[in-house]
Image (cartoon, rainbow, N blue to C red):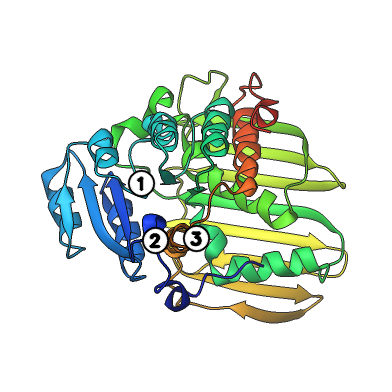
Amino acid sequence: MTKLADMSKLAGKPAPGGRTGLRLGFLGTGWIGRNRMAAICATGLVDTVFVSDPDPVCREEALALARDSHAVAGLNAMLNEGVDGVVIATPSALHAEQAIHALQSGTAVFCQKPLGRTAAEAAAVVAAARDADRLLAVDFSYRRTRAMEAIADRVQSGALGRIYAVECVFHNAYGPNKPWFYDPRLSGGGCIMDLGVHLVDLLLWALGFPEVDTVHVRRFAKGEPLHDSDVAEDHALAMLSLAGGIEARLACSWNLSAGQDAVIEMRFHGTKGSASMVNRDGSFYDFHGWAMQGTACETLAEPPDDWGGRASSDWAGRLAQGRGFDPAVDHLVAVSDVLDRLRGDVSAASARFVAS
């Protein structure tokens, strides 16, 4: 598995243009945007930051995170400041357009999930990054938990034998507190785009991105079956058949009577053993990692694990090294393709080929 870059080794390397530190823009500084900003600034790789958010409280709290920080009106103002990279944490409907604009301006991008509302949007962003030879990454942060890294290593090394079944679960006892999440035109979908996106990414990433042959899904809203993609689902159940004879079961929801804040599980079953990541006591942040064989159980990871900012810090480290386009982002389109199919939109089922 790829490990988190050693930031102490990167700190002395020159930033693009020969400077000693990065100039970064943070577009959207709600809770998640500020969290990622704090993680990136903690690397010591950043000289100057430019912040934009319509909420004055969010904006001021973000400005306090860095010594040399400046408020600007929006993305164009950031780009005019000559930033090396932009961290996008705005509503989902804006991600693709903002990312493409930044990339076409020659600026690297770190974007919150989803990269686009559809596979076609995601493919367009990846194509823009390739054409500009600029670094692009998406905040699939659950990959960077110690539990999931250890499990993926077991899966890919063959320690579990041939994987034949996977269980993916992300239930939330409540839903998002922002109205745009419930409008698929703005969010791209309901709980599938909010929570299921992580499950699909972890499933494909851990398995090495096999083809997904078939998808069977049932979507619900307030307990009623959904057949309209214009309505945000609050519960989804799916079976995915993947290349190599792997069957995956996926379940995600908002407002489920879960008895705790969240139920988050990734369970991989192979011919030689199983491995699981399970959240502790309903936490969104604390995870156990286990490997099992028969009745024996080995601990792979335990809380605490400060994983939230690892993906963003890694992006900043690679940017400081002068890295350009990363071909691995083609996999982002594969994730979006599965999300399209889970929402019943097969019109973009081959969109992953657009970016290649």
Left or right: 104 with respect to 155?
A: left
Q: Nearer the viewer, residue 12 or 55?
A: 12
Up the image or down, 345 lies above or below 174; here it is above
- As helix, strand or loop, the secondary structure at mark 2 comes to loop
Q: Residue drawn 78% across and 40% down?
A: 211
Q: Position of residue 256 (x, y in %)?
A: 46, 46
Residue denoted by label 3: 318
Q: Nearer the viewer, residue 278 or 245?
A: 245
Residue 47: quadrant of the picture? bottom left
Q: Residue drawn 65% across and 29% down?
A: 341
Residue denoted by label 2: 15
Mark 2: amino acid: Ala
Residue 73: quadrant of the picture? top left
Mark 3: amino acid: Arg
* Closer to viewer: mark 2 or mark 1: 2
Q: Position of residue 67 (x, y in %)?
A: 17, 65
Residues at discs 2 and 1 in contact (Cβ within 8 Å): no
Separation (CA) of disc 2 from disc 1: 15 Å
| Res. 236 mark | none
Is residue 259 at least partly visible in the picture?
no
Separation (CA) of disc 3 from disc 2: 10 Å
Mark 3 or mark 1, which has the lower sequence index? Answer: 1
Mark 2 or mark 1, which has the lower sequence index? Answer: 2
Total numbered labels:
3
Up the image or down, 355 lies above or below 280; here it is above
Residue denoted by label 1: 86
Q: Position of residue 215 (x, y in %)?
A: 72, 33
